[in-house]
Amino acid sequence: MFSLERWQEVFETISKNKLRTFLTGVSVASGIFILVVLLGVSVGFQNGVEKQFQNDAENIINIYPGSTSIAYKGFNKDRRIQLTNEDYALVNRETDQEIEFASSLYQIFAGLVSYGNESGSYRVEGILPDYQFLEKADIIEGRFINMNDVKAKEKYAVIGNRAKKDLFKDKSPIGEYIEVSGLNFKVIGVFTDPGGDREETRVYVPISTAQIVFGAGTDIRSMGYTLPKEENYDLALKQSNAFAAQIEQMLKSKLQIDPKDESALFISNNIENTKEIYLLINAMKIFFWGVGIATLLAGIIGVSNIMLIIVKERTKEIGIRKALGAEPLSIVGMILHESIFVTSVSGLFGLIFGLALLEIVGPYIELDFIRNPSVNFSIAVSTLILLIAAGAIAGFFPAWRGARIKPIDALRDE
């Protein structure tokens, strides 16, 4: 309940000790500021580590066909398995897991690509739009293939930066036509890939177009999926393994493959290779949270000490209040009010300065292991709640000490 008299008391006490209150506020503000910056750096560290160590999506699951090694239901062994659009649609339709990104793939490993007098042998891949995220390809010119291109079977191409330099030198390729296996394709985009030149010597076209041009019918070479990312590695691995097992069971049943056959389908689960990255990122988050909270704790201890001094200075006043009938809870509330106010206001300034610094400077930080440090809204709210709780804790013990003062002892205090 709002009490004007209580607020007047708080501001009167602060005005009598301006320097002390200011220095106390600075210690809390600096603690919150350091905590916010460290949390931002932990996010930047996660971005940097993932950028350094992952050429493809870290949680990608790829399915490749092989040949059977066990005779099954009248089929001989050594039967070559062929995946199709129907198999890809089946997985997308029937899986229990939520899918983040998905794409089927049809590829020609050595397609002849030419422009004017320049030509080269590049891997030509028919893909769906999500393939950009499976491969972590960044568009630097133009755009990527979209579903309208796939549905219309457009003869569009998105080329890697290495292929662009080979064929076009310094010229922009957007809107130009390249010849792929004797057919003209319009270049609509250029991409870079964290895998470097080897990955950038590829040419992407709509999969529907590739299947027609290369006479594939409805055949595909492979399919790839990612699931929504989990912060916990064990949970991510469990979900990923369950998804892979479901795909395997589903496809083996449809394609008449013995459930024990290990060579008919190959399913690679990239998340199994990323445990070290998860552990490293989590360890750094714990470290940054620990350092930040320790810094904030130092400021809170300072607030608590100041409040003890205030209680000591106001001992006689507290005695008079209790002699006139003030309840212990009222004394506790009086001290807590001031403690939470000082902590919250000064901490809020530290929070705002920390967020402003990350917002202004963060996008320009592109180091090897720290990229775009930032703090999201939920972390900012959590920090604010932590701040208010810290103010309450800082003031509680001095307030409880003040509430336990006996009026007769307080009135004798000098």
Image: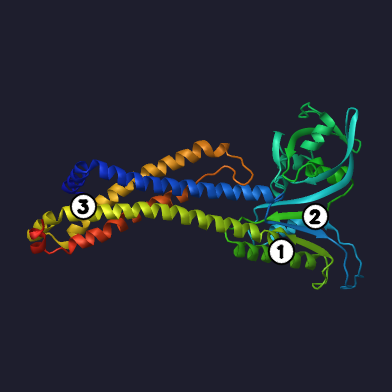
Q: Residue at x 90, y 47 (%)?
A: 215
Report x, y in % for residue 234.
61, 65
Task: Name the residue that disc number 3 marks.
Answer: 310
Q: Amino acid at mark 1?
A: Ala
Cα–Cα gap, marks 3 and 2: 72 Å
Q: Residue at position x 18%, y 62% from top?
A: 403
Q: Residues within 10 Å of mark 3 (few under 14, many from 20)?
A: some
The crowding category of the residue bearing disc 1, from other C-alpha atoms within 10 Å (few below 14, some 14 to 19, many at least 20), is many
- Quick one: label 3 or label 2, which is nearer the N terminus? 2
Q: Nearer the viewer, residue 183 or 381?
A: 381
Q: Please, what secondary structure does the residue beneath circle 1 have?
A: helix
**Count of numbered labels shown in the rendering:** 3
**Residue that mark 1 sits on:** 244
Q: Is residue 104 visible?
A: yes
Distance from Cα at disc 1 to Cα at disc 3: 64 Å
Disc 2 residue type (three-letter): Ser
Mark 2–mark 1 CB contact (< 8 Å) = no
Residue type at tag 3: Ile
Q: Quadrant of residue 187?
A: top right
Relative to 382, 214 lies left or right: right
Check the image and name the residue furthest to the front.
414
Q: Secondary structure at mark 3?
A: helix
Q: Nearer the viewer, residue 5 or 204?
A: 5
Disc on res. 222:
2
Residue drawn at x 87%, y 46% as measured from the top left:
108
SS for dot 2: strand
When the figure is inspected, residue 24 is found, relative to residue 277, above or below; the finding is: above
Please say if 270 is above or below 338.
below
